Image (spheres, rainbow, N blue to C red):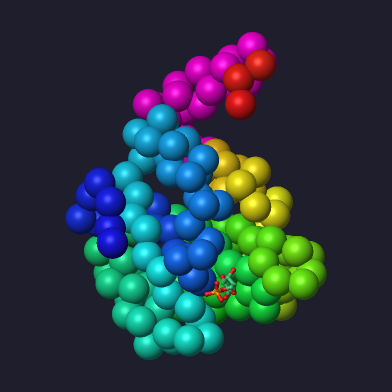
Amino acid sequence: MVKSAKTPRVMIVLGSSSDLPVIEGCKSLLERFGISYGVEVASAHRQPAKLHRILNKCDKNGTQVYIAVAGMAAHLPGVMASLTDKPVIGVPVAAGALAGVDALLSIAQMPGGVPVATVAIGSSGGKNAAVLSARIFALSDKKIEAALVEYRKYLAKGGK
Ligand code: RP5
């Protein structure tokens, strides 16, 4: 399930289709900034071979940033970071008895050398994953840099 481009600049991978609501704002913001993205569901625990295939294909085809979304024992972002040298942004999902604190700690507490940029639990984190991606691209892309300036003005006026 890849949206908007054959080789998207950002690949969003979810641990489960039940995580999909968390990336609604993320997708909207990536569209606002003109950043192509794809969406895949691949559980690090239940579908490790599929996850490896996705990472290999995206890395070969030029995807530049990964957003990894998972709840509970959220190993997905860390496993992805172990398979690529591209930036991985981890979004913890509030699922199960611990309401996302489990996923937050699991995603943030990576061993030295295998970083995952961890954002907030849930939809706010999803949005920030999109903005952080845009900030990475804006380092070398004037159009995205300008879109971020506009977005900041929008926030200052009370936009969400
Ligand atoms: C995680 O377990 C997923 O990322 C999801 O947040 C959670 C529950 O998954 P399902 O049981 O709904 O598939 O791996």
From the viewer's perspective, is 61 left or right of 113? left
Vertical position of residue 58 compared to residue 63: above or below:
below
Majority secondary structure in the magenta region? helix
From the viewer's perspective, is 53 left or right of 138? left
From the viewer's perspective, is 116 left or right of 146? right
Q: Is residue 153 visible?
A: yes
Q: Residue at x 53, y 23 (%)?
A: 151
Split into quadrants, the picture shows ligand 1 in the one at: bottom right
Vertical position of residue 27 compared to residue 122: above or below:
above
Residue 132 image offset from top left, x and y in percent: 56, 43
The residue furthest top is: 157
Vertical position of residue 119 compared to residue 40: above or below:
above
Residue 140: in magenta span: yes
Residue 156: in magenta span: yes
Q: Is residue 113 visible?
A: no
Residue 23 image offset from top left, x and y in percent: 50, 50
**Quadrant in the picture for the N terminus:** bottom left
Q: Residue at x 51, y 71 (%)?
A: 15
**Quadrant in the picture for the C terminus:** top right
Instruction: Report the number of numbered marks.
Output: 0
Vertical position of residue 132 compared to residue 49: above or below:
above
- Quarter of the figure with residue 7: bottom left
For the record, the magenta segment spans 132-157
The answer to which of 64 and 42 lies nearer the viewer is 42
Residue 8 image offset from top left, x and y in percent: 30, 53
Residue 104 image offset from top left, x and y in percent: 73, 64
Q: Residue at x 38, y 87 (%)?
A: 49
Q: Residue at x 65, y 52 (%)?
A: 122
